[in-house]
Image (cartoon, rainbow, N blue to C red):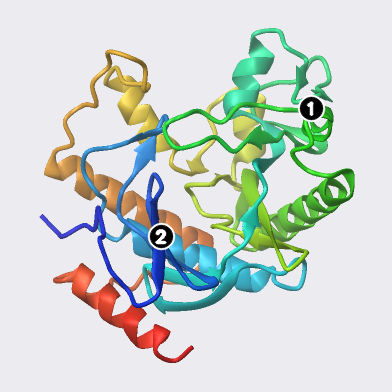
Amino acid sequence: MKQALTKTEFQFPGQTNLYKGKVRDVYSIGDKLVMVATDRISAFDVVLPKGIPYKGQMLNQIAAKFLDATADIVPNWKMATPDPMVTVGIRCEGFPVEMIVRGYLCGSAWRTYKSGVREICGVKIPEGMKENQQFPTPIITPTTKAAQGLHDEDISKEEILAQGLVSAEDYALLEKYTMALFLRGSEMAAKRGLILVDTKYEFGKYDGEIYLIDEIHTPDSSRYFYAEGYQERFEKGEEQKQLSKEFVRIWLMDNGFQGKAGQTVPEMTDEIVEGISERYIELYENIVGEKFIKEDISNIEARIEKNISDYLKTV
């Protein structure tokens, strides 16, 4: 079985903290963050027991490309990618909310709608909509940014402002940036024969200015449909052909796992792991429009440590 990076324990000069997220290990060094995209994979807020070879490289490289392609809209935290699995950037003070933007009624929003609810995060949804139908205009449905191990919760703009989580002035900018980023992402997806269905953005502040942080437009944080055949499938009420991590969730649900108490993650055989890795490569090549070049993974940790160390010596 190919090697996968599931944990790191580096010690760099000037390092003050190591935060381990679901799939990223983030090192604080001075006023910089060194974010290592591991090969861990999560679903239903649970980190699965095996890593997926090349997944970290794919997600890091997709995010880097989209950060570069949207830097004219809003400044972002990225400074450099010294390794295919690493991004070094500015350490920002993150806002305690995530900006979810939806162009189509699907996923959790559809499940909520189907139950009879006609307002999501304070946004009124028209009557008579069908699954995977495009909204008249994209909607923003924010969530709280929960601590590790806890679930993010839906929240309205009004609640965010009332609780003082974000100032009215800053929130207006977050909305503006979110819509502009989604428009740019949608335009880029259309050129690849894709529809950007929904996605999330995270923002922070540095020196009083709002920055885009974390990953953007990756299949872990976004849902894409294939544009070809979308209308026909929609009219027939058929499932859409999509590019996202949804296939992993479906496999888990088919095997009786949705992250609930008492449930056990199904066995991740080498065949299953290899299949997920191949699907991620397909996602990468469709979203980016370039062939995925596999890096040498014979000794991932040593490679990453050397590349980060060499970069830190230059700044």
Which residue does the image show at 57% across and 28% down from the upper left?
107
Mark closer to the chain start, 1 or 2: 2
Picture quadrant of residue 159: top right
Kind of element beneath mark 1: helix
Amino acid at the residue labelled 2: Asn
Amino acid carrying mark 1 in the image: Glu
Spot occupied by residue 68 in the image (x, y as percentages of width and height): 62, 73
Write down the residue under mark 2: 17
| CA separation in Å, label 1 and label 2 | 32 Å
Q: Secondary structure at mark 2?
A: strand
Q: Residue furthest top?
A: 116
At x 36% / y 36%, what residue is drawn?
248
List x then y, in percent, for residue 301: 22, 69
Determine if residue 231 is in view.
yes
- Badge 1 is on which residue? 159
Q: Is residue 294 left or right of residue 155?
A: left
Q: Residues within 10 Å of mark 2 (few under 14, many from 20)?
A: few
Q: In the rendered view of the protein, which quadrant contains the N terminus?
A: bottom left
Residue 144 position, x and y percent, is 63, 34
Residue 39, position as x, y percentages in the image: 30, 54
Using residue 58 as the reference point, say whether residue 72 is left or right of it.
Answer: right
Viewer-side residue, 170 vs 252? 170
Question: Does 289 appear above or below 146?
Answer: below
- Residue 198 vs 66, above or below: the answer is above
Determine the residue positioned at 69% across, 68% down: 70
Q: Nearer the viewer, residue 111 or 79?
A: 79
Rendered image: mark on residue 177: none
Residue 236 at least partly seen: no
- In front of the other: 309 or 67: 309
Relative depth, front residue between 198 and 242? 198
